[in-house]
Image: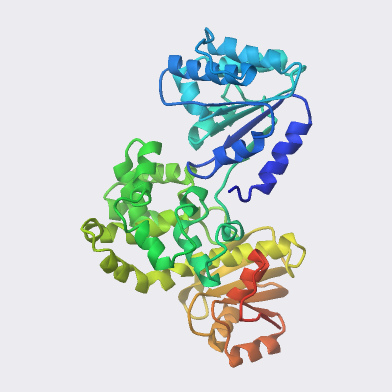
Amino acid sequence: MFIGRERELESLNRLYLSDRFEFVVVYGRRRVGKTALLSHFIKTRKSIYFMGVESNEKQNLENFSRSIMETVNGISARTSFLSFQDALEYVFRLSENERIILVIDEYPYVARSSGSFASSLQLLIDKYKDHSRMMLILCGSSMSYMEDQVLAYKSPLYGRRTAQMKILPFDFEETCRYFGNFAGEDKAVIYGIAGGTPQYLLQMNDQLSIEENVKNTFLNPTSAMFEEPENLLKQEVREPALYNAIITAVAGGASRMSEISAKVGESSNVCSAYLKNLIALGLIEKETPYGEKASRRSIYIIADNMFRFWYRFIPENNSIIARGATDLAWRHIEPHLSDYMGKIFEEICRQYLWKLLLTGRAPVEFTELGRWWGTDPSLHIQTEIDIMGEQDRDTALFGECKWTNEKVGRGVLETLVRRSRLFHYTRTVLYLFAKSGFTKGCAELAAELGNVSLITYGDILETLCGEKEAIATEHF
């Protein structure tokens, strides 16, 4: 079952239809669905697909030669080209007469096994690009390698590509398509647990409850998910132990550099270098208060939901999970899920606002959304705003998100109003998001103010996923 990636497929199809030489670089984290995307794209077209392996040049050349011969002759031949340059030139010559897609998947393995591969490819691109009909696609999971050795200025291939695609995990809207049988609330929770990485979503079963899914995957020592974060780190970095300690510290609430450094027992300089790599991998995100490009108040958060869930709950329960006490481990996790979902709900609410903007229904045409935190000078306390977005110096929106079973009351809206007045915009639009609806007092105040939208999770689900929930939306 292939789901999503409409924009990526549209871009690939447009490039294919140009019928001239195209060179596309596709990269992204492991498990994110790059190979599935490319396989779907080429399945009805004449193509040569070759996946590099972590081996030597001879093995990769033999496999590449076999891929070429199977496409050209329809049989698996044992013959091998003398060099990668010979093999590549053969395909370039073929593509002078017909449209051929050449996909080299896990390109970093190939390029590392053959030091001259990139230079040979550069030479042949320059030689044939003006009269070749090849569509060349280089794909890789090592994001640092693809960015430094393929896309960067110092790369031999710099300036040759005609397009690049960074494949990201699915958002909540796309994730919902996987799960037709989950109840509305469970779709948000499963997104908070598994994130938007297709390989992780495939481990979830929408015929089962959230509890059963967590027990079958994260609390099952024989499951692929049980050790997935640690295994992924081992594939990506040289010193997984320290990376693991840093992510664990962030998951445990250490968000500032000084806190992380103290937690792991390393200097800030060391932690900074490791955090930079984790940011490049898409696992950690550096967040600054909205409107500030660089700030001493910057914090670090876990960017991937699956990693966030795993590091929040699995290490502290590892001993009892290893002993098969699955029910006990779940009882340790379940009471904290609602609190854990708070940040996930904020993310879903931001996606809702982006959907309104992109469909022309947003009352504020913001260019970015973020979270703000700082000092409330009137109360002399630290405060924060869940969502903030600015259209211009005169107009902005502010949002507060509450994932609780109780209806949101008047006091929450009053607090949002007060915090919005920390800024001096002529026009403000307020959004109050709630899992379970709003009290009568909150609705009455919203009506009085006239610039407030009260949005339930049901409305978000309908807007993003086309599903109606029992709780209606109230706009004032």
- The residue most toward the front is 75
Of 184 and 355, nearer the camera is 184
**Residue 409 percent location from the top left of the image:** 54, 87
Q: Is residue 205 left or right of residue 247?
A: right
Q: How many marks?
A: 0
- Depicted 157 relative to depicted 410: above or below: above
Task: Check the picture and name the quadrant holding the C terminus.
Answer: bottom right
| Quadrant hosting residue 179 | bottom right
- Depicted 62 relative to depicted 149: above or below: above
- Depicted 120 relative to depicted 165: above or below: above
Of 255 and 188, nearer the camera is 188
* Residue 152 shows in the view: no
**Residue 449 percent location from the top left of the image:** 69, 86
Instruction: Tell me how the rendering is colored.
Output: rainbow
| Quadrant hosting residue 437 | bottom right
**Residue 458 percent location from the top left of the image:** 61, 75
Q: Is residue 319 left or right of residue 372?
A: left
* Residue 403 shows in the view: yes
Q: Is residue 375 left or right of residue 258?
A: right
- The residue most toward the top is 82
| Residue drawn at 40 percent across, 22 percent down | 55
| Residue drawn at 44 percent across, 55 percent down | 306
**Residue 256 percent location from the top left of the image:** 40, 57
Of 68 and 425, nearer the camera is 68
- Depicted 157 relative to depicted 245: above or below: above
Of 428 and 129, nearer the camera is 129
| Residue drawn at 57 percent across, 88 percent down | 410
